[in-house]
Image (cartoon, rainbow, N blue to C red):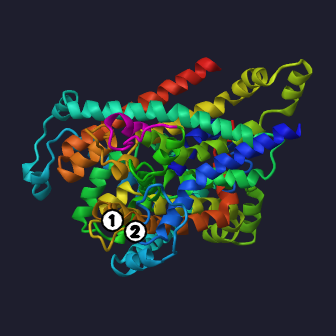
């Protein structure tokens, strides 16, 4: 049935276009001069392409600092949490110790608690520690997370014990086994978790909004939202800000999308 | 939202496996348990993560619970001597607070409006992309998925302009269908539908991936048998696809609902909760009370009310799952 096939593909093409249209429009409007996006009927392609919005963002509004903040905290949180989570996940998978089940079940059941519950006390704690408005304020709640521990534990369970035993016979210590055997073998799950954590930290909004009070410390989403309040009459500038906020995280995703998709699927497919 | 979404499912599955493993482990305690004596190492590996979670998650949860029974405000922030224990007063106030009921109503409107809609769209997209007739599946999947990975604040900025009453693309396109311009975000009756539409666009790709995984798990012979018996498309969908997908759908339903109850950034960026508080969500109300007016006791109580709502709704869905099975 070639007709049916054509209609199906036509439908897919149209809906895909509708899905990505906001992005196309975002990029296009970001390349327009002031006032050119606010015309009727809407223009989809700029009359003349200009990078004036980007120049203005980087010179006048110090978006470079916000971009750096976003990159820095996302990498920092990803790096630290990857180490902490993989160590704990390995321990839960391959060691036997008292209270293991109870501890693990406690962790799992606490995943239902929404993060908003912890925000007030966390803010107060960091305030009294003098850490509000520092990179540490973003790192601290992200250092370890239960989902990451869980994901790594699941993967580590599939690594055969015999590998660890033979390493032990060869005289490897606990930390050597972790770093030389477990980590290299767990690379796929580590990549998945890296994307999840990086993107989660990059896209996070509520906590940075609370924990960062100075505009030079803002991450991109927070900077963009405050920009919005001051420059809401300047859509071209806002679009340029949105493009800058989206491009890095989109690049990371496109480069590693297979692992990310696999991560989502593996989270749901069993059972 | 992504990590949370994957979490909850594995929990139930894993618990069983985990217990089985433990039983097996204790049985051959004397024959082969090479790591059972290495207790100190296990604790060393656990220490950093467990310490971080205990200090920066469990203690704050307990603290929030205590704070919700106090009148913690800007004066208490400067000196704890101004802090008073007021028992259930915050909770009683919540139940007499018209603004809370407004936020509650809005949040439910969003969850009930956007939840089923985004699940339906996800399932539809997944089935389309699972059809053997479709070529370039990966490419289409990618297009549908891009909104999921992009920063919500950035896309909310764009959608705010798509919804612009005068220059927005949406009204322009609707003009071709001779629909009069709508002030999407300025009209109290249209603001929440507008936010729902954007949220569905932003999120459907995630559930689509999970549904694709679920669809691929349905054995092909079921469909072949149905075709042999002369079952039409609708019949196959109703009698094979839907029942076989029931566990996936419940899972998707729960994670979507938990995520949607935490609605915040969309209205915060697009409408600031307006017009006439018609898009004010529970989380935004919590944020405003806590971090704008520094009524932290009240804000903590709001957080716990949100938690109980989410908890109850998740239990309800799990109950429903049992009935289905």
Asked if marks 2 and 1 touch (Cβ < 8 Å), the reply is yes
Please give the count of numbered marks on the rendered protein: 2
- Closest to the observer, B323 or B28: B323
Q: Which residues are magenta?
A: B178-193
Image mark 1: chain: A
Q: Residue furthest bottom?
A: A59
Is B183 colored magenta in this rendering? yes
On residue A227, the disc is 1
Chain of residue at mark 2: A
Q: Is residue A257 visible?
A: yes
Please tell me whether residue B37 belongs to the stretch shown in magenta. no
Residue of label 2: A237
In which quadrant of the rendered view does residue A94 lie?
bottom right
Report crowding for label 1: few under 14, some 14 to 19, many 20 or more residues within 10 A (C-alpha): some
Residue B39 in percent (x, y) is at 55, 57
Q: Determine whether, in the image, residue A33 is placed left or right of residue B241.
A: left
How dense is the environment of label 2, judged by Cα within 10 Å: few (below 14), some, or many (20 and up)?
many
- Residue occupying image coordinates x 74% and y 28%: B241
Q: Nearer the viewer, residue A105 or A146?
A: A146
Q: How far, Cα to Cα, is label 2 from label 1? A: 9 Å
Q: Position of residue B276 (x, y in %)?
A: 25, 38
Q: Is residue A103 above or below residue A209?
A: above
In the visual, does A154 lie left or right of B117? Answer: right
**Would residue B252 be seen by someone viewing this image from the given angle?**
no
Front residue (pair B301, B149)? B149
Q: Nearer the viewer, mark 2 or mark 1?
A: 2
Residue B317 at what x, y percent from top left?
A: 52, 26
Q: Earlier in the sequence, mark 2 or mark 1?
A: 1
Q: Secondary structure at mark 2?
A: helix
Q: Residue at x 39, y 73 (%)?
A: A66
């Amino acid at each position: 049935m070639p007709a049916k096939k054509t209609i199906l593909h036509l439908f897919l093409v149209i809906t895909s276009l509708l899905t990505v249209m906001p992005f196309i429009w975002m990029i296009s409007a970001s390349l327009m001069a002031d006032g050119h996006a606010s015309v009727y009927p809407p223009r989809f392609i700029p009359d003349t392409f200009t990078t004036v919005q980007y120049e203005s963002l980087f010179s006048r509004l110090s978006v470079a600092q916000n971009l750096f903040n976003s990159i820095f905290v996302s990498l920092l949180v990803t790096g630290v949490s990857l180490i902490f989570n993989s160590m704990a996940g390995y321990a839960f998978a391959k060691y036997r110790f008292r209270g293991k089940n109870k501890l693990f079940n406690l962790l799992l059941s606490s995943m239902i608690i929404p993060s908003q519950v912890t925000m007030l006390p966390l803010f107060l704690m960091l305030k009294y520690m003098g850490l509000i408005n520092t990179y540490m304020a973003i790192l601290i709640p992200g250092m370890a997370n239960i989902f990451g521990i869980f994901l790594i534990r699941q993967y580590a369970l599939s690594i055969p014990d015999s590998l660890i035993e033979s390493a032990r016979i060869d005289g490897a210590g606990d930390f050597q086994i972790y770093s030389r055997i477990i980590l290299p073998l767990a690379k796929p799950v580590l990549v998945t978790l890296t994307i999840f954590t990086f993107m989660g930290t990059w896209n996070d909004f509520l906590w940075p909004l609370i924990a960062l009070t100075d505009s030079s410390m803002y991450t991109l989403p927070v900077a963009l939202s405050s920009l919005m309040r001051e420059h809401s009459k300047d859509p071209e500038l806002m679009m340029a800000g949105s493009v800058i906020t989206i491009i890095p995280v989109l690049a990371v995703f496109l480069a590693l999308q297979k692992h990310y998709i696999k991560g989502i699927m593996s989270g749901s497919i069993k059972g | 939202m992504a990590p949370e979404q994957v979490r909850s499912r594995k929990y139930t599955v894993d618990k069983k496996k985990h217990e089985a493993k433990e039983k097996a482990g204790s049985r051959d305690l004397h024959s082969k348990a090479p790591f059972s004596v290495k207790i100190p190492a296990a604790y060393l590996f656990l220490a950093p993560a467990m310490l971080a979670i205990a200090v920066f998650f469990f203690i704050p949860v307990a603290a929030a619970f205590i704070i919700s029974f106090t009148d913690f405000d800007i004066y208490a922030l400067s000196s704890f001597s101004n802090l008073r224990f007021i028992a259930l007063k915050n909770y009683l106030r919540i139940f007499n607070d018209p603004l809370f009921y407004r936020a509650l109503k809005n949040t439910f409107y969003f969850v009930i409006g956007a939840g089923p809609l985004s699940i339906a769209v996800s399932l539809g997209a997944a089935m389309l992309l699972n059809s053997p007739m479709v070529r370039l599946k990966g490419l289409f999947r990618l297009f549908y998925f891009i909104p999921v990975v992009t920063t919500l604040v950035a896309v909310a900025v764009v959608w705010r302009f798509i919804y612009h009453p005068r220059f927005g693309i949406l009204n322009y396109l609707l003009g071709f269908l001779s629909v009069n311009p709508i002030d999407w975000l300025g009209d109290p009756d249209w603001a929440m539908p507008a936010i729902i539409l954007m949220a569905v666009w932003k999120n459907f790709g995630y559930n689509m991936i999970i549904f694709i995984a679920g669809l691929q798990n349905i054995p092909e012979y079921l469909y072949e048998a149905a075709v042999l018996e002369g079952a039409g498309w609708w019949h196959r969908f109703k009698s094979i696809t839907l029942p076989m997908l029931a566990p996936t759908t419940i899972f998707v339903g729960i994670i979507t609902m938990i995520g949607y109850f935490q609605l915040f950034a969309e209205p915060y960026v697009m409408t600031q909760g307006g017009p006439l508080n018609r898009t004010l969500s529970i989380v935004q109300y919590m944020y405003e009370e806590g971090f704008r007016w520094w009524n932290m006791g009240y804000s903590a109580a709001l957080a716990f009310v949100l938690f109980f709502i989410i908890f109850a709704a998740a239990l309800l869905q799990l109950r429903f799952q049992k009935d289905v099975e």
